[in-house]
Amino acid sequence: TNRADTMAEADQQDPHKWLEDVLGDESMAWVKGKNAECIAAIGDPTITDTYKRILTILDSKDKIPNLFRIGGPSGMYYNFWQDDVHVEGIWRKITLESYKSATPEWKTVIDVDALEPPVCGTAKTWVWHGSTLLDEGPGALCDRAIIALSPGGSDADTRREFDLVKECWVEPADGGFAMPKAAKTQCAYRSRDEVLVGTDFDGDGKALTDSGYPRVVKSWKRGTPIESAVVVFEGEQTDVSVSQHAYHDRGFVHEFQRRNITFWTKKVWYRKLTAENLNTVSADAEAAPFKEVAIQPDARLSTFADAAMLTLRSDWNPPGSPTTFKAGSLLSVPMDKAMQGDWSAVVALFEPTPAKSLVRRTETRDFVILKTLQDVCTVLEFWKYEDGSWVKQGSGTSEAVAVGEDVDVECLARVAEETNEVWITRGGYLVPDTQEISNAENGCTVTEKLRSKPAMFDATRLIVEQNFATSPDGTKIPYFVMRRKDLVFDGSNPTLLNAYGGFEISMLPRYSAVEGAGWLEKGGVKVIANIRGGGEYGPTWHQAALKENRYKCYEDMEAVASDLLSRRMCTPATLACIGGSNGGLLVGNMLTRPLASSLFGAAVCQVPLLDMKAYSKL
């Protein structure tokens, strides 16, 4: 009661409490007035040549489509595309030969703008939330998908089944799966005639967790109403979310149940199935029992064929192994052995060092491609799985890419076990993106370039460099600087310092034509700081700035700012900080911390989460 009284009193004393009615008339009038004051002081940006140029860049159709093959070697390549004509977007397809040509011929599969508008709530348009494919194993035709559409773009979405061959919706009258009521939903095929679904089944929230995500998973059979779906798994009300999913994996079939206890921790159960089991016995009738997997709660478990793949977020000594593996390691052992608690044959596909971390992995039919960072510079590593063993491959791409550049690899097909071919995307702060096709079998040393973005600003007089600042506890903090080659280090250069520092998200080089045209070309300096809280050096880099140590990411930001000042790149009068969302919270701290407030002459605080008690209610 005392705590409630204290919070109520604080609300009464808050002179800005009324602004929490974000879209209220009074709040909107206040925003309009503040905008008018700003424009009166510095001018209307919309009438400037720079604004018009940036608008042209944003409206440019010179985007590179992200496309993936569906339907095996003879399948089509699908892409979701938005532009000024297709505002909500179209899901379209093309042959690879046509895509490679000078005049690609796309065929629209689903036009989101043309759909009948939502009938729930006040939303007037649909927002594409993706597709889930029916995968019936090697050689099967992928001919069905479940499409997720959100009314207005909220977290809640609807689900409808789509026939990829006939290019039409599968109506409920014809046995199609459909969930027209928007909710936070998980829904995926278990077999052609069964889906596993978690949602707000009765609309009363009882099937959801306190976090608003599915708590109950049911088996729903084709041709039956969802009201007849049978419960197969339940979690606790306090869990973040609960799920169950089964899938084919290079000739093997796996089924998992997961309770996500917190954002980072979970409990996992597993059972091994056969393709015949999956196709003939529903989840509620399957006799094979689930068994809990004895791994760390914060580890991430998946499979590759018959092998378990485990990514560690904290140090672990697996049962039967003499080695304690560091957080950030990627381990593999036969799944059967993992279920027996025997990790004596464990193979470490990656082990971190103080300078090296694993960012992500890409899987193809026979290969796992690791994207690693060596002091925030990308290095690719290749492993092949053959005859039940992992073999590390040599690669001409084993050297780190140039400072300020990056490379990403994704499987050519949505179902990774179909091919070893991959898409490669290259780019950097000053380098426009290119799209290439390659093959994991040659370590991606031979590529075919398909697309290139045009240069949208003049980078010939610009350079990217990487420096390191020292935080108060002695930790080296890397940061990238984009600047003119002939920059004079006299403190007069307008400098914009950006950082994020949260959720284990790495800030890696990407091409930004807006910053190039609006800032760099005009002599401005842009700095990206890889502060703790992010993922640039793996889980420990993230964990180093949590809870009672959260202040360390703010000290890192101050250290980078101080380093810029000591190099005479700028002065406090010419140095600004910028950040959005979690980065906005960072900027809020820069405004209020005694040291930081003396380092910056300006701040750009974008969509910040500043009031951690009220933000979820706004």
Image (tube, grey):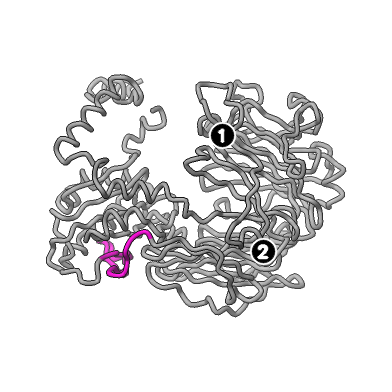
* Count of residue discs: 2
Marks 1 and 2: in contact by CB < 8 Å?
no
Q: Quadrant of the C terminus?
A: top left
In the displayed structure image, the side of residue 96 where residue 378 appears, left or right: left
Work out which residue is located at the far front of the displayed protein and give it.
103
Which stretch is magenta?
A: 456-483
Residue 195 quadrant: top right
Q: Is residue 37 above or below residue 454?
A: above
Per the image, the residue denoted by label 2 is 364
Q: Is residue 270 above or below residue 123?
A: below
Please check the rendered image and state whether residue 429 is part of the magenta-colored stretch, yes or no.
no
Given residues 372 and 428, the one toward you in this image is 428
Picture disc at residue 258: none
Name the spot of residue 313 as percent of width and height, x first. Answer: 51, 57
Picture disc at residue 113: 1
Given residues 362 and 488, the one toward you in this image is 488
Secondary element at image label 2: loop
Name the spot of residue 482 as percent of width and height, x first. Answer: 29, 64
Please check the rendered image and state whether residue 474 is part of the magenta-colored stretch, yes or no.
yes
Q: Please give the name of the residue rendered at 44% of the width and 71% of the height, measured from the top-left corner.
A: 374
Name the spot of residue 218 as percent of width and height, x first. Answer: 72, 33
Whether residue 256 is visible here, answered yes or no, is yes
